Image (tube, rainbow, N blue to C red):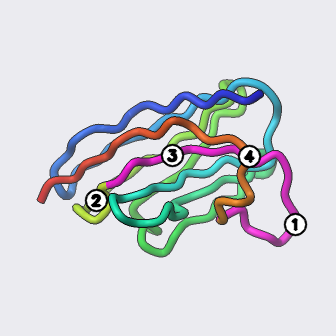
């Protein structure tokens, strides 16, 4: 069983920054990702990182503003969020994927096996 503990959410003004962390216990992973869900909307992909080689993937809406990184020794993934916008307001979830396929980016919710409890990010205008 994998447990994911997220931290770092909060309230920030537009243009500000936040860094989310997600510490994972248990087994090794193929990838870890961040997703978000705003009220009344479906959960959407934000960013992901291949655990072994470090390849990263971003949603178009966050590319250039968000950076995903990992600390293999700590089994922790980070999401540095800069230039935040009100439309970034959502509950952010981290997730782990046990397996994947070469050439298939881990950007879909069904590719992930374990999910964190979520952390609220609110960006005021």
Q: Mark 3 points at which residue?
A: 93
Q: Quadrant of the C terminus?
A: bottom left
Answer with left or right where residue 125 lies relative to residue 103.
left
Q: Earlier in the sequence, mark 3 or mark 1?
A: 3
Residue under the point 43% across and 57% down: 37
What's the distance in space between the residues labelled 2 and 1, CA to CA? 32 Å
| Spot occupied by residue 108 in the image (x, y as percentages of width and height) | 66, 65
Question: Is 56 situated above or below 121?
Answer: below
Q: Name the residue under label 1.
A: 102
Residue under the point 80% across and 48% down: 30
Q: Which numbered disc covers residue 83?
A: 2
Q: Quadrant of the N terminus?
A: top right
In front: label 3 or label 1: 3
Question: Is 106 situated above or below 61?
Answer: above
What's the distance in space between the residues labelled 4 and 3, CA to CA? 13 Å
- Asked whether the residues under the numbered discs 4 and 3 touch, taking CB atoms below 8 Å apart as contact, a structural biologist would say no
Q: Earlier in the sequence, mark 2 or mark 3?
A: 2
């Amino acid at each position: 069983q994998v447990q994911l503990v997220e931290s770092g959410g909060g309230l920030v003004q537009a243009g500000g920054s936040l860094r989310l962390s997600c510490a994972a216990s248990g087994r090794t992973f193929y990838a870890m990702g961040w997703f978000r869900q705003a009220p009344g909307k479906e959960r959407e992909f934000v960013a992901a990182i291949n655990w072994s080689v470090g390849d990263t993937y971003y949603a178009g809406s966050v590319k250039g503003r968000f950076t995903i990184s990992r600390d293999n020794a700590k089994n922790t993934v980070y999401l540095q969020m800069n230039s935040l916008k009100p439309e970034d307001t959502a509950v952010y979830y981290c997730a782990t994927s046990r397996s994947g396929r070469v050439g298939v980016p881990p950007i879909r919710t069904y590719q992930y096996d374990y999910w964190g409890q979520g952390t609220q990010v609110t960006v005021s205008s």
